[in-house]
Image: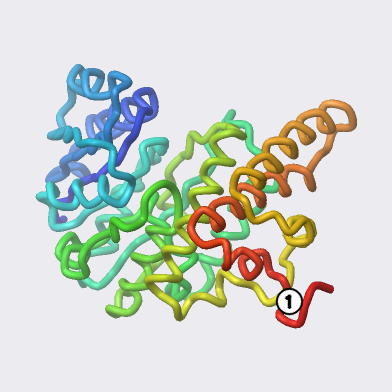
Amino acid sequence: MRSLTIAIASYERKDDVTRLVRGLQDLADHSPASWEGVDIVVVLDGSTDGSAEALADLQGTLPLSTIWQENAGLSAARNAGLRAATGELIWFLDDDLLPLPGTIERHRRAHEVRDEVMLLGPCNVAPGIELYKAARDFWNEHNALRAEGDRIERFDLIAVANASLSTNLLRSIGGFDERFVGYGLEDFELALRLLEAGTIVKFDADAVCWHYTALNERLERLRRRETGRNTVRFIDIHPEITEHYFPSDYPSRSMQILDRTRLHSPRLLMMVSELSAFATAVTTRLVGRGYLLRVLSLDASYAAGIADMDRSLLHRALGRPQQGVR
């Protein structure tokens, strides 16, 4: 099999990244033939939480390189891993994942015939991890869409959390765009360029990684704000996908509510987000549900991110009909 570098970008998540690297070493110890020619590169993107020291203490059969850089964002960290990769193939794993036995074999076999292939595997919620039903349903539907047909042709179904491809192919199209900072959409932008280059993107439902994601409402709101900022960056780079992110009508009740408030200040929108999050916690505790308020909280964070970049785009991002508000 062709040589492979596992590239992991991490920021301030010592427990996650050490669990992953330790898990990879354990898998290699139990199936050495499948892991021959594999090495690991971990890029610590400004981590100061002891990640470097913890990784230095790990012992295993797989070669492990750790790179520390000033915090520059996920795209820059993944590019650092790409530059350091020595394998003919590169397999990107998020630091809160853990592959199941057999997953690496499925990734490596997918690239035996040709270079112009990218393989995606699912990141299934690990046993015992609490997650909202709506989030579980979203990922189940997302993976069902990815499994349709022989290949994936929609850029917004292509994520890089558990994905492998030719190292030279990725280098030839310039790697990740480092104009994307914070969370979100850098892999969709990469996907657009890969598809334009003729890459065949496949989904293997059995190339599974457990995802050790935990509920963190505050982090989720921050990520939604960063996604809003990166949405503006994305359509600036690729104006042809503007309509994908700017709906012609309100996609949800919460978006309509936000538009009708006529709030354009990121600070005020984040106040709406925080108040809605507080109300969600109260109503959930009292009556057992608070779905609309939670969605409003997340959508307000997203709107704040849009407004951070360009307030004139806010009404379009929220979905206000062009002929006026209904």
Is 288 left or right of 198, judged from the image as shown? right
Quick check: can you spot residue 162? no
What's under tag 1, amino acid-wise? Answer: Pro
Query: How is this picture coloured?
Result: rainbow
- Rendered view: 250 above or below 296: below
Residue drawn 21% across and 72% down? 114
Q: Quadrant of the N terminus?
A: bottom left
Residue drawn 32% across and 45% down? 73
Quick check: can you spot residue 75? yes
Residue 151: image quadrant is: bottom left
Comparing 124 with 72, the one in front is: 72
Is 151 left or right of 61, judged from the image as shown? right
Residue drawn 66% across and 47% down? 269
Comparing 284 with 212, the one in front is: 284
Residue 7: image quadrant is: top left
Give the total of numbered labels: 1
- Rendered view: 228 above or below 114: above
- Rendered view: 219 above or below 86: above
User: At which x and y percent is residue 301?
Assistant: 61, 47
User: At which x and y percent is residue 12?
Assistant: 36, 28
Disc 1 residue crowd, few under 14, some 14–19, many 20+, Cα 10 Å: some
Q: Which residue is mark 1?
A: 321
Q: Quadrant of the C terminus?
A: bottom right
Comparing 295 with 302, the one in front is: 302
Most extreme residue toward the right, as rendered? 287
Is 302 left or right of 198, judged from the image as shown? right
Comparing 274 with 267, the one in front is: 267
Element assignment for label 1: loop
User: At which x and y percent is residue 30?
Assistant: 26, 31
User: At which x and y percent is residue 234?
Assistant: 43, 66
